[in-house]
Image (spheres, helix red, strand yellow):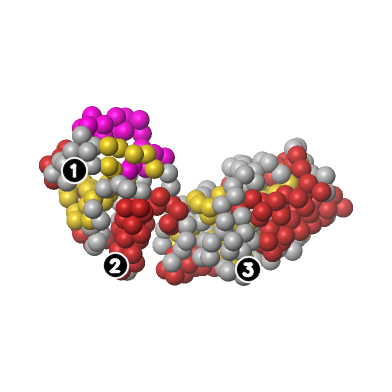
Amino acid sequence: MNNMFQKRLDQVSHKINDLGYDGFYISNLTNIRYLTGFTGSAGLLLIIDGVSYFFTDGRYIKQSSEQVKNSKITIIDSSYFEAITQAQLIKQNNLSIGFESEHISFSNYNGLKKNFSHINWHPTNSIVENIASIKDQYEIDSLKTAIQITDYVFEKIISNIKPGVTEKYISAKISYLFKTNGAEGDSYESIIASGPNSALPHARPTDRKFQKGDFIVMDFGALYNGYHADMTRTLLIGPATKKHQEIYDIVLKAQLNGINTAKEGVSCSSVDNACRSIIDNNGYADFFNHSTGHGLGLEVHTLPRIHKSNNQLLQSNQVITIEPGIYLPDWGGVRIEDDCLISKDQCIPLNKSTKELIII
């Protein structure tokens, strides 16, 4: 495990060196966890000349000593700025240090400039996130376990879906099943959206009761070792009409086309187009109103972004979602989503749950 974190730190250090920087100021807790294993709620990582220094407060003395093995630990009793100054890590004039521009507040940025005016501060974008988008075996195994738990819970929850049951009840039941079947909990608040609510891509569970003729969009995932699963299946409380089957079949065809397109060297925009073109050609272009997918990892939405304007090429061992949908206002919607492992020659769906239309 220590070697895994050291390898990640080395990758970041090499990237910083390639950019011509002397150091890197990392404030995002997810990125700190990726690089050190620290799971607490307060911390800072500073890499200077290839050596990493971790700062946290007195709440995490024991936890940091157990989790952080490849960085020099400082327990602060004041501000991070004061602790860095006291450690004399960046006292030299005109050092060039990068910082995470997406993850620092305006006040903290001003604090850096005020307290370390002798440093040349450089904004960076997604340095750690790009490295983290390519998963190592530990991450792939953790994601596979999260996905297996998600599949299991889906199988168990189906029998609870019937007319009169509320969206909130199913959401709560899913959370319970996750925690009693090996997961840390929910990857995110489950989307359980029925009837007209299913036309809202990110609807929150309500007290609405399931009714006959409802599509039920179920978007949920288990959290395991900090890694997020993210699956969507759409069920129907029958009877099924011709329109129900038509919409479902178009979305399924689009999703399968995306899976068949994705592999190493294919652009994210090409995967999006593979899904979107099927929906567009069937007359529903105006009703697919989000991107096709995203990367998974220690955050549920991370790199790479699978959307029409992203020409970044997919790489082996990235794990992405492919999740097209059609949403018809005041009627209902369908989304189908798998978590997929990118390899040299193919895209491998990791979910095993059926994608045939389940009619209750």
In this rendering, the label closer to the viewer, 1 or 3: 1
What residue sits 32% from the left and 43% below the top? 98
Q: Residues within 10 Å of mark 1 (few under 14, many from 20)?
A: many
> Which quadrant is home to the C terminus?
bottom right
Local SS, label 2? helix
Q: Which residue is mark 2?
A: 2
Identify the element where label 1 is drawn: loop
Q: Is residue 345 above or below residue 228?
A: below
Tell me the distance, in whole angstroms, between the alpha carbons under discs 1 and 3.
47 Å
What type is the residue that disc 1 sits on? Ile
Instruction: Pick the residue in front: 267 or 241.
Output: 267
Query: Could you tell me if the residues under marks 1 and 3 are in contact, i.e. CB atoms within 8 Å?
Result: no
Query: Residue at position x 27%, y 42% from top?
Result: 96
Q: Which residues are magenta?
A: 98-117
Give x and y (percent) for residue 154.
61, 62
Residue 338 visible in rendering: no
Residue linked to disc 3: 346
Mark 2 → mark 1, Cα distance in angstroms: 26 Å
Q: Horizontal and vertical percent for residue 56?
A: 23, 48
Task: Give the residue number, with chain letter if any, for mark 1.
Answer: 90
Q: Quadrant of residue 340?
A: bottom right
